[in-house]
Image (tube, helix red, strand yellow):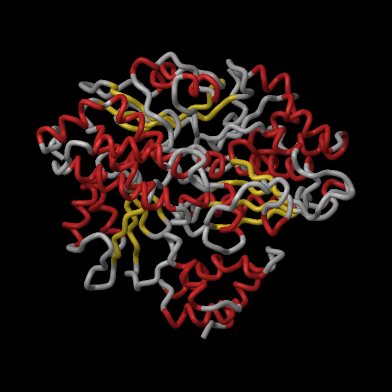
Amino acid sequence: METPLTARMRKDGEPVGLEEYERAGGYRALRKALRGMMPAEVIAEVKDSALRGRGGAGFGTGLKWSLVPAGPDAPRPKYIVANGDEMEPGTFKDRLILEHDPHEFIEGILLAGYAIEGAAGYIFLRGEYTVAGERVRKALAEARAAGYIGRNILGSGFDFEVHVHMSAGRYMCGEETGLLNALEGRRANPRAKPPFPVVSGVWGKPTVINNVETLACVPHIIANGAAWFKGLSKSADGGTKLYGVSGKVKRPGLWELPMGTTVREILDLAGGMRDGLKLRGFLPGGASTDFLTGEHLDVKMDFTEVQKAGSRMGTGTMIVLDDRTCPVGMTWNLEHFFAQESCGWCTPCWSGLGWAERLLAAIEGGRGEPGDLEKLAGITKFVAPGNTFCALAPGAAEPLQSALKYFREDFERHIREKRCPWGA
Amino acid sequence: MLTPEERAEIEAEAAHYPDRKSVTIDAMRIVQRRRGWVSDETLRDLAEFLEMTPDDLDGIATFYNLIYRKPVGRHVITVCDSVSCWIMGYGRIREHLIKQLGIGMGETTPDGRFTLLPIVCLGACDHAPVMMVDDDTHLDLTPEKVDRILERYR
């Protein structure tokens, strides 16, 4: 089984340096593209590879690039923004690439920049990723010294700069239009779409925003071809995927596996549940995805199949709920996060999520009342897609609406007995 | 007054952006790294330097988790309170820190050594529970491990 994203990573935890990266075939894809491919051919190859965005939404990467205005009359400069604001609770995959193979990710930015005829790339990193920040800056300096970044890269006439922006922390920065505002030095409130960032993004210029893991796939696609990348996958979505498991399993961790690996296979790698515990449910891909349960263990983890099961693959990092952890407490924790991180820009979100959090706190604290569950269900409709500016509140509704569906008896018991049966 | 070093560092960062205002968040981080926090006076000086009103800048400062508008201790402890850490025993770690430091969340020890704050998911969920002390991330926490870590910052 091939694991292109992680194959070069060192066992000692140190990052792959430039020489080591080059020895293992690194920057070969950039050379190939700059010397023998037109930008449109790079886009076509990525389109054919069926690479879908790894940040959670799963938008086709090649399709996104193709929406950027091209040709001599296109607005310029055009930008690539790498979204390394990994703040989705339960998600710890981009950190691995940033800390352990930064050149793989940087080469992806350069290829994306070439494909859209861009002028510069901005790496947007969350402020807490201090080790990643140091390692990425060091890798950028190495790449610049070797002639992969800057003017006339590899003698091709292509100029491209790459900069790092360390964020000051807020979940909203991961939402792409919020991220653009943060990069411009503002509050990370969302922007109305349209115009979409590919047409009018940072500083009003065409901007492609791609997740770190997405960009890290690109050099492998260009070096080995779209057909090879599709062949890595067990599903219609191309490539491998970094899948993670956290919660009370025997071996929490992160694994690079073929796209479309089943939930059961991933949980097996995590060693199954800790002794004495049973699985009650799981969030397949971060905090903003609907709960699934033990009935869904044979679901393939890809964008289409998880959706068919009633949730989303999201970031592909699962959070497991065991039978000794209170589902109401867990849902309260999730909604506390979303209510706190709401930027306050639109009313359904700041009002609705705050209300949901207070109701959940009351239920967990033994102060719930008959009718509270109907109110909670109402809030999930109130913040549904179309009622809010961005995806934060609809994302917050996903674990809440599914918890009410799968763990209804637990909620009712809290209200009936006026206490948390788990003693919280 | 901003120091010449602060001005130079902010200018160097601003050169990476086509629009000078974009350096606002970097500028606050640069100044905070040297001063520990962003006081009202610092905020006014920075606003003047960035050619914006103090109120506009404060609206940005207070939006971000990692900009401190109140004084903090010499070391800032941020404890992850998000879902994976919550499942894995965040509550126990928080209670232990509160007991050992003798302060509540959001407070600073009387000797000015530690400030204790909650933080959202730190992206190390396979090693929950997790906290940071300043720039260092500490994994797989137990109360005993927390004691050993605190000792290193005394």
- The answer to whether A128 is drawn above or below residue A298 in the figure is below
Q: Is residue A140 left or right of residue A119?
A: left
Q: Report x, y in % for residue A274.
A: 27, 24
Q: Residue at x 36, y 27 (%)?
A: A282
Q: Which corner quadrant of the image does residue A231 belong to?
A: top right
Q: Report x, y in % for residue B88.
A: 28, 38
Q: Report x, y in % for residue A103.
A: 65, 43
Q: Residue at x 43, y 28 (%)?
A: A284
- The answer to whether A378 is drawn above or below residue A228 in the figure is below
Q: Is residue B74 left or right of residue A259?
A: left
Is B110 in front, or is B63? B63
Q: Report x, y in % for residue A317.
A: 45, 32
Q: Which corner quadrant of the image does residue A333 belong to?
A: top left
Q: Residue furthest bottom?
A: B1
Q: Is residue B135 left or right of residue B16?
A: left
Q: Is residue B100 left or right of residue B40?
A: left
- The answer to whether A200 is drawn above or below residue B154 in the figure is above
Q: Residue at x 73, y 41 (%)?
A: A112
Picture mark count: 0
Q: Quadrant where the N terminus of chain A lies?
A: top right
Is A21 in front, or is A295? A295
Q: Quadrant where the C terminus of chain A lies?
A: top left
Is A287 in front, or is A358? A358
Is A227 in front, or is A295? A295
Q: Which corner quadrant of the image does residue A238 belong to?
A: top right
